[in-house]
Amino acid sequence: MYQKLCKALKDESGITALETAIILIAFVVVAAVFAFTVLSAGTVTTEKGKQAIFSGLEEVSSSLELRGSVLAISNTVGTAGTGKVGHLVFTVGNVAGGTGIDLTDTSGENKVVIDYRDGSQYVSPLNWTVSWPVRRDDDDILEDGELARIDVDLTGVNLGPDTAFAIEVKPPRGGVLIIQNTTPSFIDSVIDFH
């Protein structure tokens, strides 16, 4: 028995070429499966990242910007400390390279919501109308190169003298345009907030 054990230990016959090829092929197949899994996960992650980037660009590219002054028009002119603002009028345009924004006003099916807030009240939504000082076509879509004048009705809001207020213009997608200001101590017929 001892002789057989010594003979087995001294046996130098190794793995045959066929066995080596089978092991090598198994390693290659396992490596290919892992590589495919890693590449598939990378592709899915890249697609999700691309979707997030395009979604963010769409949000930014469809925002409004203020063009010119904001005017407050009084519905009653009074002495110092009296009077109320009846309308707020401002002009908006699309940001450079922005997508069109539907500005159908509250006389139709409006898409843009305008809210009012100050230290003591919040009114949402407000009625507003739109006119087009610069227009390229007959639709109510604010497109590049067009200007829209928005007249916000504040008759149901108690906006008097020395009041800090904010108007929020919320399109269906894109950034919110916030107009913040404080009314003066005397409410003139027309107040230019510059």
Image (tube, rainbow, N blue to C red):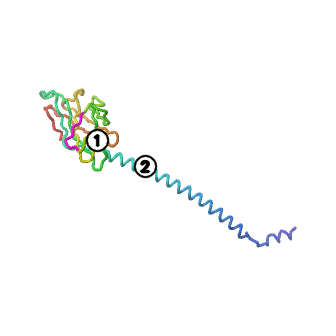
Magenta extent: 129-135
Residue 134 lies within the magenta run: yes
Labels 1 and 2: the sequence-earlier one:
2
At label 1, which amino acid type do we have? Ile
Crowdedness near tag 2: few (<14), some (14–19) or many (≥20) residues, C-alpha within 10 Å: few
Q: Amino acid at mark 2?
A: Gln
* Main SS category, magenta section: strand
**Toward the viewer: 121 or 87?**
87
Q: Position of residue 168 (x, y in %)?
A: 28, 37
Q: Specify the quadrant that holds the C terminus.
A: top left
Residue at the disc numbered 2? 51
How would you rate the neighbour count of disc 1 (Cα within 10 Å): few for under 14, some for 14-19, many for 20 or more? some
Image quarter in which the N terminus is found:
bottom right
Which residue is drawn at the image coordinates 30% and 34% (left, top)? 110
Give residue 103's position: percent from left, percent from top: 28, 38
Q: Is residue 83 magenta?
A: no
Identify the residue at the far right of this view: 1
Where disc 2 sits, the SS reads helix
Most foreground residue, 116 or 43: 43
Q: Which residue is mark 1?
A: 141
